[in-house]
């Protein structure tokens, strides 16, 4: 299949491009810079110059290909208003991609987060909440999945808060970056809250499987570790960096603070059973052993 990928040079996207190419697919990937274009070319993909805000370029990518994987999201999210702006840009991009696919029967796989459910791990059947700091992303994903009734084989791969590789990436990566800046590994609350996680290469394999075979209007969970206590994650980071751990106010994590403080385990039992997805790469705590001080 000739696949159009946005966000193909990020942590997830790099792995997705490699996964697609290794399974015989051809990749056209959005490139917003010369460096990104060079990286994609080196990986074996064809770059298409433009950004997530270039809606005509996105439509061009759809027109040239047989399926889409949408991963692009804004950068530099620490700036005031950056998260809200990135969510709005993603919504416009997904609308453009979905509209370009109407009536085609072609697949599009987008990315979202695993939902929070009180008292138990979330499952693939749980709806994405349309309230909270990232509610706009949920609305965009739900709108895309609704295009199943208009001839679009849309599906969503829900990602846990930490997507990791070689000890880097996701919320655990943000903890590490903050620790390097402050000299201690801080976390909100008592650290008992649990975060699900997945290795980037395992996530990539699920994106490929969803592209190839997921039914229209479905959502799947890319989760290997159902939920690891944040204090356990912090303890490994602290040991690897030679630091202490400490509790800090959630406000120190900016717009992500409330999400950092939530207990949000997630299950992937249905995904494994129905799509045959089997993670094979290291879990988060093992992968964090690759961190270097």
Image (cartoon, rainbow, N blue to C red):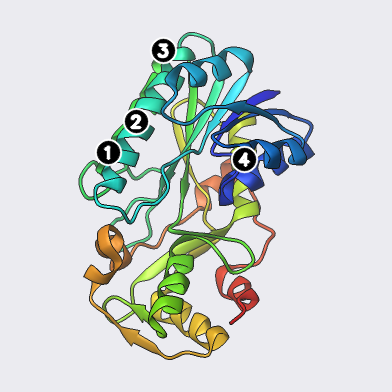
Above or below, 179 relative to 152: below
Circle 4 residue: 36
Image quarter (top left, top right, bottom left or bottom right) of the N terminus = top right
Taking the image as shown, residue 116 lies to the left or right of residue 266, namely left
Whole-Å distance between the Cαs marked 1 and 2? 8 Å
Image quarter (top left, top right, bottom left or bottom right) of the C terminus = bottom right
Above or below, 63 relative to 210: above
Mark in the foreground, 1 or 3: 1
> Residue placed at 60% from the left, 22% from the top?
67
- Tag 3 or tag 4, which sits nearer the N-term? 4
Whole-Å distance between the Cαs marked 4 and 3? 34 Å
Residue 256 locus on image (x, y percent): 30, 60
Local crowd size for mark 3, using a 10 Å CA cut-off: few (<14), some (14–19), many (≥20): some
Whole-Å distance between the Cαs marked 1 and 3? 22 Å
Local crowd size for mark 2, using a 10 Å CA cut-off: few (<14), some (14–19), many (≥20): many
- Tag 4 or tag 1, which sits nearer the N-term? 4
Helix, strand or loop at mark 2: helix
Circle 3 residue: 150
């Amino acid at each position: 299949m000739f696949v159009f990928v946005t966000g193909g040079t990020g942590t997830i996207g790099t792995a997705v491009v490699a996964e697609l190419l290794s399974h015989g697919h051809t990749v056209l990937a959005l490139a917003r810079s010369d460096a990104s274009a060079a990286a994609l070319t080196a990986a074996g993909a064809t770059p298409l110059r433009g950004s997530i805000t270039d809606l005509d370029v996105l439509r061009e990518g759809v027109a040239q290909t047989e399926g889409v994987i949408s991963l692009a999201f804004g950068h530099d999210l620490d700036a005031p208003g950056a998260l809200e702006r990135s969510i709005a840009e993603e919504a416009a991009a997904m609308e453009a991609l979905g509209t370009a696919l109407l009536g085609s029967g072609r697949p599009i796989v987008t990315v979202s987060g695993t939902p929070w459910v009180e008292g138990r791990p979330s499952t693939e059947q749980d709806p994405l909440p349309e309230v909270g700091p990232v509610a706009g992303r949920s609305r965009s994903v739900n709108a895309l999945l609704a295009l199943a009734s208009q001839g679009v084989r849309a599906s969503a791969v829900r990602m846990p808060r930490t997507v990791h590789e070689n000890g880097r990436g996701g919320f655990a990566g943000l903890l590490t970056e903050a620790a390097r800046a402050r000299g201690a590994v801080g976390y909100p609350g008592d650290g008992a809250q649990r975060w699900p996680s997945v290795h980037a290469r395992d996530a990539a394999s699920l994106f490929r499987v969803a592209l190839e075979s997921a039914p229209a209007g479905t959502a799947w969970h890319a989760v290997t570790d159902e939920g690891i206590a944040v204090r356990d994650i912090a303890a490994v980071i602290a040991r690897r960096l030679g630091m202490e751990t400490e509790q800090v106010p959630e406000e120190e994590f900016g717009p992500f603070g409330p999400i950092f403080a939530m207990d949000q385990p997630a299950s992937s039992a249905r995904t494994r059973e129905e799509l045959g997805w089997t993670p094979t790469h290291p879990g988060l705590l093992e992968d964090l052993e690759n961190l270097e001080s």
